[in-house]
Every structure is written in structure tokens, then in C-alpha cells.
Image: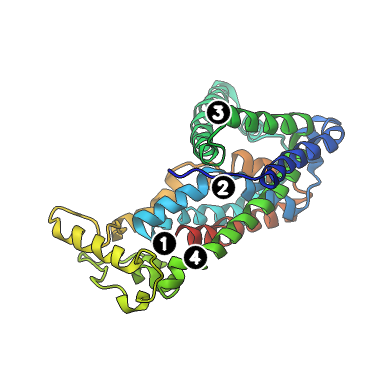
Amino acid sequence: MQSMSLSTGDFSVILLYFAVSIGLGLFLSRRGGKSLSEYFLSGRSVPWWLVGTGMVATTFAADTPLFITGVIGTSGISGNWVWWSAAAGGMLTVFFFARLWRRAGVLTDLEFIEIRYTGRAASILRGFKSIYFGLFINCIVMGWVNLAMLGIMRILFPEVDGQLAVTICALVTLAYVAISGLWGVMIADAFQFTVALGGCILLAVFAVQHPRIQAAGGLNAALPAPVYDFLPHFSDTNFWPEQAVPASDVSNAEEEPNIINEANATNEANAADETNTNDGNGLQRIDLWSFLAFILIQWWASWYPGAEPGGGGYIAQRIMSARNERHGLLATLWFVVAHYCVRSWPWIVGAI
């Protein structure tokens, strides 16, 4: 894998990013230390736009764009229904549970369990939830996020120990979270989300303007048309055409590899393999039953951080920090829109 060489200006921007994150934590440390309510819930006084931005920023980790790229490389844009289907649970949270979480008046979702249920069974439930989600699930989530960050570090800083770099990032994050509480987390989230989303938009613009894409006649002509389909095809036969676009569109490419010919060559190679269950371009389509499982079952039958049907975890924590029930509802609505509609499309364009 080809490594990058960063200039002094690049390192200055990176150091500035860390300095701003720590500076925000220091600035808000006195406010976060006033009381438990200030530390864990920002005094229940956060406006909806900041609460919602904090939610979507928390789901925006180093691994997320890499995951989207892998999905599109495997199944095209329609492959994203594997996680778009969770929007149903998000909307359920918006219109049925967001107001209730804010109305509960608790510090954490575990406190809600303590109030709602009594007896030995409730104690066992709280203990199980604390250990299972707080330890095991969090370790898995942090593991894949840090693994993605490690891969990025090894490209950006090939001369630096990747594990050391990830450790430094973790310590910086721990520092501003520990000293400022949820106020520092959400203010830093808003700053980091703005920077990250802006970078993704710039990457998408640069990707569209890449010479190979322009030589192919634009983004729509660079790959077979079904790659761009929003909904999956449900035919039992291959729906990917043998010849997606005319090769004449790239006849004047200046010694750049011919994207269309590359795709067609892959198509011919896969078609020759009688045991290949993929489509003609090496992409695995989503069949009807998988799609129905995603939109009818998976969103409510599985648990994933930030996509809990009805809310929970850091989603509930942020709803409870909102100024009132209305702000809690608007925050969750903004999160769902930004998470599933706004944020994903720069990633998709860049991945294509």
C-alpha cells in the first residue's frame, strides 16, 4: 500500500485539531464539574441542534467510511440497505420514545431500569446490562474503531508507531471527556463532525473530478448502471449488463487505465466461472428475502450502538440532556435525517 508524505502545514493542521479538542474540554471543565447533572447531562439545557449533532458525530468513527466503501464495493449503493433499514427504529424513537426519555428525569438508562423494575430480577438485569454492554460490547466496538484508526495511521504516518499514535488519540479523547463531562463531549463532537463532514464532501468532489472518472465520461458512466441503483434488483438472473457503457467514451484517455474495460474484463472473467454466485461484475446483489429481512426484522430484532429501537445508551443519554421534550424530539429527528440521509452520500460518492 502506498504511503503518504505530509508537509509541515499538514502536521500543523493535525496539531491544531488536537489543540482545539483539548482546549474545548479545558474551557468547559468548570461548567461540567458543578454537579452530576452538569457532568452527565449538561444540566439538561442543551439545544436540539447540538444534541442531535452530538448523536450523529458519535456514530461517525474512523471505521464508518471504510465500511460504506466495502459495502458499495460488494453490492453497490443498494447494499447500504443493510444499515439503512435501521432508520425505521430511529423514526420509532423520534415519534414515540424521545419525549418519554426526556420526561423520565433520570441520569442514565440504567437508572430508568432501577425505577421501572423492582426486586432481584431488576438487579440482575441492571448488572447484566452494565457488564454486557459496558464491557463486552464496548470492547468490540472500540476494537474495530481503533483497528480502522490504526490502518489510517499507518498510511498517514508510516514512520510512526501506529499503536503509539492510536494510544495518543485515545489519551487526548479521554482527557477532554474526563475534565468536561457531556458538555465537552458534545461541543467537541460538533467541532469534529463539522471538520469530518467537510473533509468527506471535499473528498467526494475530488473523486468526481478525478482524471479517470472524467475520462470515462463522468461518474455515471464510470461503472455499470446498476451500481448506482438505490433499490436492489430481485431477479433470479444476472441483472448486470455485459456491456454497461460504450467503451468509446474513454477513447481519448491520456494513458490512464480504462475503467470501463477493466469492469468488462472482470465481468467476462466472472461469467466464465460457472460456480460464481456473484453478478457479472463481481458484485453480490441483495436478494428479495435478504432485503425483506433487513426492513422487516433486522431493525427491531438486533442491537447496534446508535440504532437501538426506542433509544438507549448514548442516544438516550443525549435526549435526556435536551432542554425539554420538544428539543429532545427535534434532536432525535435531526440525528436520523443527518445519519441516514445527509452524512452517507459524500461517503457513497467517494466510495464509488
Image check: 348 left or right of 256?
right
User: Upstream in the sequence, badge 3 or badge 4?
Assistant: 3
Q: Distance of mark 2 from mark 1, alpha carbons? A: 27 Å
Q: Is residue 147 above or below residue 48?
A: above
Please name the amino acid that badge 4 sits on.
His
Residue in the image at 35% along x and 71% along y? 225
User: Upstream in the sequence, badge 3 or badge 2?
Assistant: 3
Q: Which residue is mark 3?
A: 161
| Closer to the camera in the image, 112 or 314 | 314
Give the image quarter of residue 80: bottom left
Secondary structure found at label 3? loop
User: Upstream in the sequence, badge 4 or badge 1?
Assistant: 1
| Closer to the camera in the image, 219 or 261 | 261
- Residue 168 image position (x, y, % from top left): 64, 29
Assign the C terminus to one quadrant of the image: bottom left
Task: Sort mark 1 into few (<14), some (14-19) or many (20+) by Cα contacts within 10 Å.
Answer: many
Residue 210 — which label? Answer: 4
Assign the N terminus to one quadrant of the image: top left
Q: Distance of mark 4 from mark 1, alpha carbons? A: 20 Å
Image check: 34 left or right of 212?
right
- Residue 343 image position (x, y, % from top left): 58, 58
Q: Which residue is mark 2?
A: 310
Q: Count of labels shown?
A: 4
Please name the amino acid that badge 2 sits on.
Gly
Please name the amino acid that badge 1 sits on.
Ile
User: Upstream in the sequence, badge 3 or badge 1?
Assistant: 1
Q: Which residue is mark 1?
A: 77
